[in-house]
Image (cartoon, helix red, strand yellow):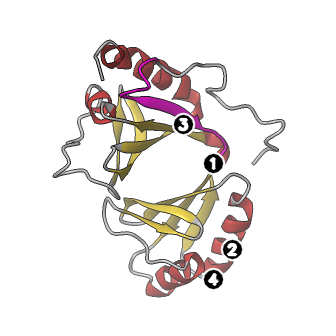
């Protein structure tokens, strides 16, 4: 990743929408993001990654928390590791070493993505305005994640808690568009009494 002193967040110049009492929205700039690919039939590679992460890889559409950060299931052979800024290089090296000689890939995608954090009583309602995902608490709860589209933008969505709080992982190239769409869609909730 580029030095954070020189790096520029794709959303740094934008303000959060009004209505923080019922909906909070902010960017989590410069979080480390590592894409893991591993053949689920290669039990040795699977075990090596779990050993390096000191956690079991999550099941379909779920996440796990570990010392490295959050690990999200993106597909049968794909996972996303979200870590604190600056830890991604060492973590990627550790995961690559664990996979040495095995079938798998470790790709640092930190510079190509950003994370938007949404939280509050209307966070689920806001996401439902632009997504086809079933976000009802019976279907999508804390620890759940999914790849989908939000306002026609491909995202990875991770629910953190019952507040509800979410992380929306999006490519930098469309982050500003999605932020502005969310801010506009959130105006409905700013006008409502809390």
* Residue designated by label 3: 171
Q: Tell me which label, 2 or 1, sits earlier in the chain.
A: 1
The location of residue 88, given as percent across then percent down, is 68, 59
* Residue designated by label 4: 101
Circle on res. 31:
1
Q: Residue at x 39, y 80 (%)?
A: 41
Q: Is residue 27 on the magenta stretch?
A: yes
Within 10 Å of the Cα at label 3, are there few (<14), some (14-19), or many (20+) other Cα atoms? many
Cα–Cα gap, marks 2 and 3: 25 Å
Within 10 Å of the Cα at label 4, are there few (<14), some (14-19), or many (20+) other Cα atoms? few
In this picture, is 148 found above or below 34? above
Q: Residue at x 37, y 20 (%)?
A: 186
Residue 51 horizontal side relative to residue 151, left or right: right
* Residue designated by label 2: 94
> Which SS type dominates the magenta stretch?
loop
Q: Report helix, strand or loop for mark 1.
A: loop
């Amino acid at each position: 990743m580029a030095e954070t002193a020189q790096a520029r967040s794709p959303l740094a110049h934008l303000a959060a929408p009004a209505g923080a009492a019922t909906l909070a929205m902010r960017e989590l700039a410069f979080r480390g993001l590592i894409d893991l690919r591993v053949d689920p039939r290669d039990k040795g590679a699977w075990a090596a990654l779990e050993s390096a992460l000191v956690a079991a890889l999550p099941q379909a559409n779920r996440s796990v928390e570990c010392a490295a950060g959050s690990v999200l299931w993106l597909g049968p052979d794909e996972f996303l590791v979200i870590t604190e800024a600056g830890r991604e290089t060492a973590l990627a090296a550790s995961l690559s070493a664990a996979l040495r000689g095995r079938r798998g890939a470790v790709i640092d995608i930190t510079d190509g993505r950003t994370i938007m954090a949404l939280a509050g009583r209307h966070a689920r309602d806001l996401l439902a305005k632009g997504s086809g995902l079933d976000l009802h608490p019976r279907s999508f709860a804390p620890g759940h994640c999914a790849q989908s589209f939000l306002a026609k933008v491909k995202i990875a969505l991770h629910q953190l808690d019952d507040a509800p709080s979410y992380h929306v992982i999006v490519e930098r190239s469309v982050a500003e568009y999605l932020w502005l769409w969310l801010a506009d869609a959130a105006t409905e909730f700013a006008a409502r009494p809390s």
